[in-house]
Image: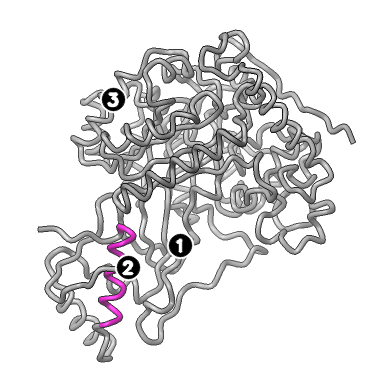
Amino acid sequence: MSAVSAETKPVVGRGFRLQWEPAQEAHVLLYPEGMVKLNSSAAAILSRCDGIRTVADIVTDIESAYGVTGLSPDVAAFVALAQEKGWLEIRG
Amino acid sequence: MSERLAEGSASFHTDEQVPAATAAPGLRAEEPESRVRPGPPLWLLLELTYRCPLHCVFCYNPTDFATTGPELGTDDWIRVLREARALGAVQLGLSGGEPLARDDLETIVAEAHTLGFYINLITSGIGLTEARIAALKQAGLDHIQLSFQDSSRELNDFLSSTRTFELKSKVAALIRKYDYPMVLNVVLHRLNIDHVGEILELAEQMGAQYVELANTQYYGWAWLNRDRLLPSREQLRRAEETLERFRAKVGQKMKIFFVVPDYFETRPKACMNGLGSVFLTVTPDGTALPCHAARMLPGLILPNVRATSVKAVWYDSPGFNHFRGDAWMKEPCRSCPEKTKDFGGCRCQAYLLTGDAANADPVCDLSPHHHLVTEAVATAARTIAAGASKPRVEEQVLVFRDHRLSIPVTVAPAKS
């Protein structure tokens, strides 16, 4: 798993779509003939991956939204995993 | 048509959960769903038409499709989309036959997109002109799965009984141009499984991100041709070795799904994740099915969306409730600890091989009918050893899918 820089700007991968599904009461990530049902932390991270915000921005944003600190390693680990699975891409 | 869809369990990656370790504090991964009350029909497959310019020998469509009723109209399909989406359906497969044979495909896609479906077009590519791919993109189509029959023009064209290889290559270029992920599907069997290396090389050249190597599942036309399509264990072993070498070479840039040929297994596939749990298929004439081969099952009373709402189809119809839970199971499944994992395997395979859809799938080596599978494999090995496996097979021994033929389902009754 590659190290994730705080300045990386991840974006949801081509062919993937993140959306809220009321019937499942969850965010899901949709891709060709498949679906990943996301837990709320994964959804919180992925929904902020817009190719504009850096990983550092995302950490700050989630920490303030949930009123917690020290999420940096968790977010970096998730971004690395998501990148490996193709859910996230790093462009530019 | 996607054999991965036909196989079911391999196609729907709901098992891919986010590891709890990566969750932020206080947040955890989802619990598995209860099997008592069915969840929503997450996967909706609309077989828009049985019309198809190809005549594939492994097609899963019913061999008597020529006798089915008229196709649903645009308004009916749109009503089905709305009702299914309201229940929670989210993945949409548009298939057939060849879905491009419908000239209202763009209208159907546009409505599905507005409703929030992720839309997969499952196509041979025949009829996909630049004007149509542009219109489909505009309408919101998410993904195109293009099927190839083989890496070589000769075998591709022979197996589909058409001249389509060049055309498919052009369609692949269009798929790239319109910025779709490149998803290729190749159905494997005795006549092309030795070409897995070449098939993967071709896929790499085409920039494929996903490749589905789907060993033939024996339903429909493939069932008629089973004894000419089943590979040998040796062929399968070589193909898997080639696949592993190729995976090591390409790494993450290409995801390769290998749909296992279940005749070589000792445990059955969890077909459709259990009938009536996730999948809902609507056939061209409006008949709703818990799996796309289920029309063949005798005694299963199948609803039609012309007369029944999708909600009533999914939750209330006998056809969808029949194989839910385990009350229908016989031994050895009923008392088997693995019944919650594979649900007894495939009902259609149980029916085709044993004459009773409630029997254990004979792929399972706990089934008293397992010998029917091992005998078919042994026969294939003998035939291949005798030298009859080369791709110069005489056409008369293979039955090509044809709307001019109507062949009733035939069952190989159990000997014991």
Can you identify the residue that label 2 sits on?
A81
- Report the magenta residues as a range: A73-86
Q: Chain of mark 1?
A: B
B209 w.r.t. B105: above or below: below
Looking at the picture, tell me which residue is in the foreground, B92 or B386. Answer: B386
Q: Is residue B151 magenta?
A: no
> Which residue is located at x 15 percent, y 63 percent?
A51
Marks 2/1: CA–CA distance: 12 Å
Can you identify the residue that label 1 sits on?
B16
Report the amino acid beneath label 2.
Leu
Q: Are marks 1 and 3 in contact (CB under 8 Å)?
A: no
A1 w.r.t. B191: above or below: below
> Which residue is located at x 60 percent, y 53 percent?
B273
Quadrant of residue B204 within the rendered picture: top left
Report the amino acid beneath label 1.
Glu
Q: Secondary structure at mark 2?
A: helix
Can you identify the residue that label 3 sits on?
B169
